[in-house]
Amino acid sequence: MKLTPLSDRVILKMVEVEETTKSGIILTGAAKEKPSVAEVISVGPGGNVDGKDVVMTVKVGDKVITSQYAGSKVTLEDVEYLVVRQNEILAIVE
């Protein structure tokens, strides 16, 4: 089965980010509260949304940051995805 986003929506798969403190302690994504990093799995066509033209600026494979409570969670074949509008994406990680 495949998820295909409509309009200005983007399908994301969350990426577990580990961060090491200065003292060497590894913090997993669950141990801290901050924006979430995800990988773009699929991108909608954009087009005219609410009377405004939307050009999709993210592409499949991009790593992006979203706010903690953005989008809707969807589970498909035991994999959890996040469906967000492009304007809920805060930044592209390069």
Image (cartoon, rainbow, N blue to C red):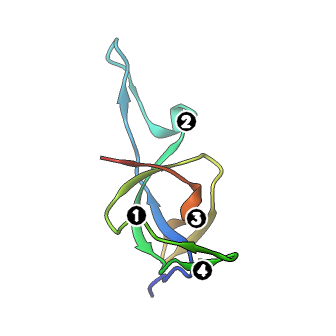
| Sequence-earlier tag: 4 or 1 | 4
Q: Quick check: marks 3 and 4 in contact, CB under 8 Å? A: no
Residue drawn at (37%, 36%) of the image: 18
Distance of mark 3 from mark 2, alpha carbons?
A: 17 Å
In front: label 3 or label 2? 3
Tell whether 7 sits left or right of 2: right
Q: Which residue is mark 1?
A: 58
Q: On the image, which quarter does residue 59 sit in?
A: bottom left
Q: Which residue is mark 2?
A: 34
Q: Which mark is residue 7?
A: none
Distance of mark 4 from mark 2, alpha carbons?
A: 32 Å
Residue drawn at (63%, 61%) of the image: 71
Q: Amino acid at mark 4?
A: Asn
Residue 48 versus residue 27 in the image, above or below: below
Distance of mark 2 from mark 1, alpha carbons?
A: 21 Å
Q: How many marks?
A: 4
In front: label 2 or label 1? 1
| Sequence-earlier tag: 3 or 2 | 2
Residue 80 position, x and y percent, is: 51, 65
Q: Nearer the viewer, residue 10 or 19?
A: 10
Q: Which residue is mark 4?
A: 48
Q: Quadrant of the N terminus?
A: bottom left
In front: label 1 or label 3? 1
Q: Which mark is residue 84?
A: 3
In front: label 3 or label 4? 4
Q: For the residue carrying disc 1, how many other residues have a C-alpha within 10 Å: few (<14), some (14-19), or many (20+)?
A: some
User: Please, what secondary structure does the residue beneath circle 1 have?
Assistant: loop
Q: For the residue carrying disc 2, how many other residues have a C-alpha within 10 Å: few (<14), some (14-19), or many (20+)?
A: few
Extreme residue toward the front, this view:
52
